[in-house]
Amino acid sequence: MIYANSSDYDNGIAPRLGVPRRDKEALLRAMTSEEPIAIAAGYLVDYSKGKPTDIVDMLYEKNGVRWSREEAWNLEHNDMEVSDEFADALLGRSRR
């Protein structure tokens, strides 16, 4: 499974913010067009403030990648860092 980034926010390791991507809009469309495979019992965290929002977190999966609503939200609002491996897999781009 490929994840959006290798950060461990629950243990105080947040992904870098303010990392622009040319394919941000395509990533957001792909990340928000899927139905969730699980719904969290908590709310997503705004990584720039380190505080929970009032939005329920969810888990998604497609093309061998997995991400949360929290990650999509932080990509949209905070330009959260996303690995090229994740972006390529989610968008179906081959790296050959």
Image (tube, helix red, strand yellow):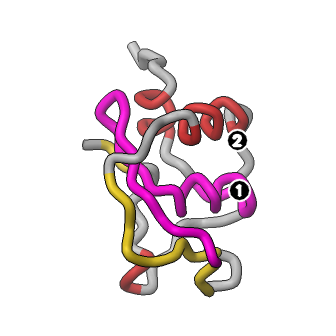
Closer-to-camera residue (26/32): 32
Q: Residues within 10 Å of mark 1 (few under 14, many from 20)?
A: many
Q: Tell me the residue at 62%/86% (across/down).
A: 51
Pick whichever of labels 1 and 2 is earlier in the sequence. 2
Look at mark 1 in the image and give the residue it sits on.
Answer: 79
Between the C-alphas of marks 1 and 2, the distance is 8 Å
Where is residue 81 shown, x and y percent of the image?
59, 55
Q: Is residue 56 above or below residue 54?
A: above
Contact (Cβ within 8 Å) of mark 1 with mark 2: yes
The quadrant of the rendering that contains the N terminus is top left
Identify which residue, 92 or 43, lies in the foreground.
Answer: 43
- Going by the numbered disc 1, the residue's amino acid type is Asp
Q: In the image, is residue 35 part of the stretch drawn in magenta?
A: no
Using the image as rendered, state which of residue 53 and residue 4 is in the foreground: 53
Q: Quadrant of residue 8?
A: bottom left
Quick one: label 2, few (<14), some, or many (20+) residues within 10 Å?
A: some
Question: For numbered disc 1, what is the local secondary structure?
Answer: loop
Give the answer, above or below, for where 10 lies relative to 78.
below
Left or right? Give the position of 4 relative to 31.
left
Q: Pinpoint residue 36: horizontal percent, then vertical percent.
A: 41, 46
Q: Is residue 42 left or right of residue 45?
A: left
In which quadrant of the rendered view does residue 94 lie? top left
User: Where is mark 2, residue-wise?
Assistant: 21
Q: From the viewer's perspective, is 93 left or right of 76?
A: left
What residue span does the magenta drawing correspond to?
Answer: 54-81
Q: Mark 2 falls on what kind of element?
A: loop
Asked if the stretch drawn in magenta spans residue 70, the answer is yes
Image point (51%, 25%), residue name: 91
Residue at point 59%, 82% (across, down): 52
